[in-house]
């Protein structure tokens, strides 16, 4: 019989005062942990490498993830511009004129992870303070109405899609760089 401890696969509702919001925040953090796990095998020389002009580097994808999370948080959820200290994290547009992710280079993996963490902390702080009514209150923007609840759903999907892209890029980079 296997004596290893049993894994607990449980959702923690205690990440916010409102348990319903806490469950969503737990899922956000679980998605981020999975991304960090994928990145644990990335070596420094892999961060800026691109196999082809049209493909994004690992660094560009990480920059994009943080930028999009900040944008949804401030523009849609909080309905305000980026604070100066957050805006300073994003001195490049997320996409170039052709619609491709901007190839942001010169940052270490640790710096990209720090940017992701700073944005995530802002998101957690904003949502921890929300009550359920605000969490489900639609924000009216010119092109759509959106709730903070839907934003969390979208951000988890967005990160999961890019996580698979990061894993594929990591594997291509390993093959190419050795």
Image: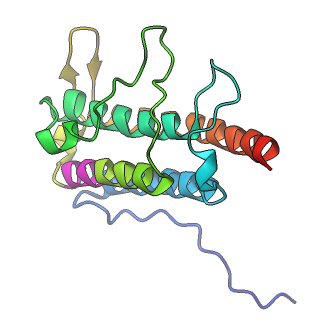
Residue nearest the observer in this picture, 147 or 39: 39
* Relative horizontal placement of residue 152, taking residue 50 as reference (left or right): left
Name the colouring of the figure.
rainbow
Name the residue at the right extreme.
1
Q: What is the quadrant of the N terminus in the image?
A: bottom right
Residue nearest the observer in this picture, 38 or 6: 38
Which of the 4 image quarters holds residue 54?
top right
- The x and y percentages for residue 163 are 59, 42
Look at the picture and state if 130 lies above or below 100.
below
Which of the 4 image quarters holds residue 66?
top left
* Identity of the residue drawn at 80% across and 50% down: 178
- The x and y percentages for residue 138 are 22, 25
* Identity of the residue drawn at 21% across and 54% down: 125
| Secondary structure predominantly adopted by residues drawn in magenta | helix
Observer able to see residue 137: no
* Identity of the residue drawn at 20% across and 34% down: 74
- The x and y percentages for residue 80 are 12, 30
* Relative horizontal placement of residue 84, taking residue 144 as reference (left or right): left
Observer able to see residue 42: yes
Question: What range of the chain is rendered magenta?
Answer: 121-128
* Relative horizontal placement of residue 48, taking residue 123 as reference (left or right): right
């Amino acid at each position: 019989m296997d004596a290893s401890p049993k894994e607990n696969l449980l959702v923690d509702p205690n990440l916010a005062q409102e348990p319903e919001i806490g469950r969503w925040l737990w899922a956000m953090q679980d998605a981020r942990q999975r991304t960090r796990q994928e990145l644990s095998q990335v070596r420094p020389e892999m961060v800026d490498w691109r196999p082809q002009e049209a493909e994004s580097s690992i660094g560009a994808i990480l920059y994009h993830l943080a930028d999009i999370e900040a944008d949804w948080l401030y523009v849609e959820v909080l309905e305000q511009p980026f604070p100066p200290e957050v805006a300073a994290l994003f001195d490049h547009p997320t996409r170039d004129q052709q619609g491709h992710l901007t190839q942001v280079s010169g940052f270490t993996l640790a710096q990209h992870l720090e940017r992701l963490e700073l944005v995530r902390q802002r998101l957690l702080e904003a949502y921890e303070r929300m009550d359920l009514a605000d969490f489900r209150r639609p924000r009216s923007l010119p092109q759509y109405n959106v709730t903070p609840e839907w934003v969390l759903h979208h951000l988890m999907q967005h990160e999961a899609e890019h996580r698979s892209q990061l894993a594929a890029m990591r594997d291509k980079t390993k093959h190419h760089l050795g």
